[in-house]
Amino acid sequence: MLGGVCGLSLATECESCGRPMGSNMDHGAQNPDNPYCVHCTDLKGKLLPFETVYTRLVSSAMETRWMNKEKAEKFALEEMGKWPAWKDKVSQMPRPA
Ligand SMILES: [Zn+2]
């Protein structure tokens, strides 16, 4: 049914960091077909390197969730491990004890 749960069914989540993308502006290069958000892509909509996305996620977790660095790093890694873009990479990384 059209116009049911407003927004929910239309918002896609970034396949790199899980941020909800509610409008075209949130997609890489403002392209609604881009599976990644603006935070995870460069100006042309290309997915950024793992390290860049990771660093951004860590600092945004510290800023918006008031996490300390250690906690934010763990959070970022867990979050990225959920998404298709980094799933394999994260699962192959050695986990800190
Ligand atoms: Zn993203």
Image (cartoon, rainbow, N blue to C red):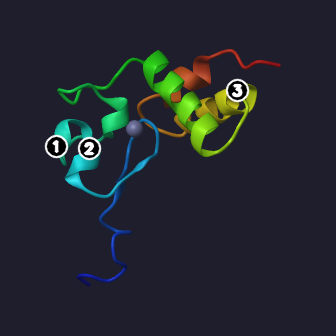
Could you tell whether 80 is left or right of 65 in the image? left
Q: Are marks 3 and 2 in contact (CB under 8 Å)?
A: no
Q: What amino acid type should be assigned to the residue bearing mark 2?
A: His
> 21 above or below 91?
below
Could you tell whether 13 is left or right of 56 in the image? left
Residue underneath mark 2: 27
Mark 3: few, some, or many residues within 10 Å (few <14, many ≥20)?
A: few
Residue underneath mark 1: 31
Viewer-proximal residue among 46 and 56:
56
Dot 3: element: helix
Q: Give the CA separation, mark 2 to mark 1.
A: 6 Å
The nearer-to-camera label among 3 and 2 is 3
Residue at point 26% right, 44% down? 27
Q: What amino acid type should be assigned to the residue bearing mark 3?
A: Lys
Residue underneath mark 3: 69
Residue at point 44% right, 47% down? 19
Q: Give the CA separation, mark 3 to mark 2.
A: 27 Å
Dot 1: element: loop
Mark 1: few, some, or many residues within 10 Å (few <14, many ≥20)?
A: some
Q: What amino acid type should be assigned to the residue bearing mark 1?
A: Asn
Mark 2: few, some, or many residues within 10 Å (few <14, many ≥20)?
A: many
The nearer-to-camera label among 3 and 1 is 3
